[in-house]
Amino acid sequence: MKIYIKKIASLFLVMGILFFTACEKEDHISESYIYSAALLPSNTIRELSLLDINAPFSTDLEVRAPENGKSVDRIDVYVTFKDLFNNGTDLSTSKNLLESISGVDVLKNIGETLRPVVKYSITKKQMIDTSKISNDAVTGGDEFVLSFTIVLKSGDEFTTDLSSVIVCPPSAPSPGTWILDMQDRFGDTWDGASLTISVDGDSKDYTMDSGKETQQFTFEVPTGANTIEVIYNIASFANEHTFQITSSTGRVVLDIGPSPVDGVQSGYDYCGF
């Protein structure tokens, strides 16, 4: 009988240890969940005009943190410059602290979800100054990355990155030889589809030859040309079709597909025109 009682006692002891260990793990997971935080951006204006030094970047940041944001000590805002189109000298920078938003300021505006919303805006000039670069270093296609780091009163930190791109206004195409690259993902031509490229109304159709996965064409843009129009003429299996157009400057100005829309294409990188 004593042996039997000892076995029962041992069993309860083991179960107690397992229960205590499980509770410890659950408490740890729960605590980790409680102290996580994030920023949910909306209404973000990312594009910055190359020609406007005061072009604005703006976003609304919903703060998702414990205690409806009361656990936030501050939000640190950093700026990083990415020199994506340099002329042999990369002027990219590491993170530079722009400013800190206090926990008190975070709580000033409460959104519809009853969470704090930080309405944040900054100009291109402020990002340039913080990055310690000149305006001449910034060209079309470059990026600024804004890093928003929530610092909780517990000391935990959580970062959300948002990028802004330098864009160029529409412009006339550069004269010279342009390149059209076409691809079919299945390798059986464009299934009856084609492209029409029009330079100031002078049009020509292009499609892939039978049995090819890729094909390249060139076309000339004369000096003084004002417009280029690219039209995708849909047929079958558009999900297999992709194409790129490279200007005479050597830069890809249009990269479309798979599944191009039928008709006139948009989305040009005018910085490469």
Image: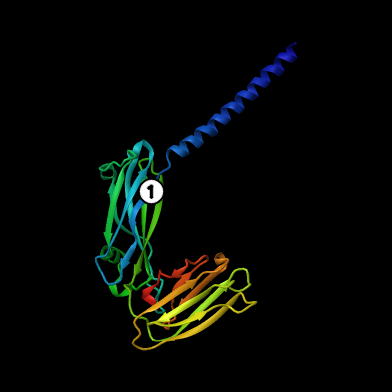
x and y, in percent, of residue 153 in the image = 35, 41
**Could you tell me if residue 157 is visible in this image?**
yes
Q: How many marks?
A: 1
The residue depicted at 48 percent of the width and 72 percent of the height is 232
Q: Secondary structure at mark 1?
A: strand
Q: Which residue is mark 1?
A: 40
Amino acid of disc 1: Leu
x and y, in percent, of residue 168 in the image = 33, 72
Q: Badge 1 local density, few (<14 within 10 Å), some, or many (20+)? A: few
x and y, in percent, of residue 29 in the image = 51, 37
The residue depicted at 47 percent of the width and 71 percent of the height is 255
In this orientation, which residue lies closer to the viewer: 74 or 185?
185
In this orientation, which residue lies closer to the viewer: 82 or 231?
231
Q: Quadrant of the C terminus?
A: bottom left
Q: Is residue 57 above or below residue 109?
A: below
The residue depicted at 52 percent of the width and 77 percent of the height is 181
In the figure, residue 72 lies in which quadrant?
top left
- Residue furthest top as drawn: 1
Give the left or right position of residue 130, taking residue 237 as reference.
Answer: left
Give the left or right position of residue 53, taking residue 113 as reference.
Answer: left
**Could you tell me if residue 273 is visible in this image?**
no
In this orientation, which residue lies closer to the viewer: 154 or 245?
245
Rendered image coloring scheme:
rainbow
x and y, in percent, of residue 215 in the image = 57, 79
Q: Is residue 186 above or below residue 249?
A: above
Q: Is residue 213 above or below residue 44?
A: below
Q: Is residue 1 above or below residue 218?
A: above
- Residue furthest bottom as drawn: 223
Q: Quadrant of the N terminus?
A: top right
In the figure, residue 70 lies in which quadrant?
top left
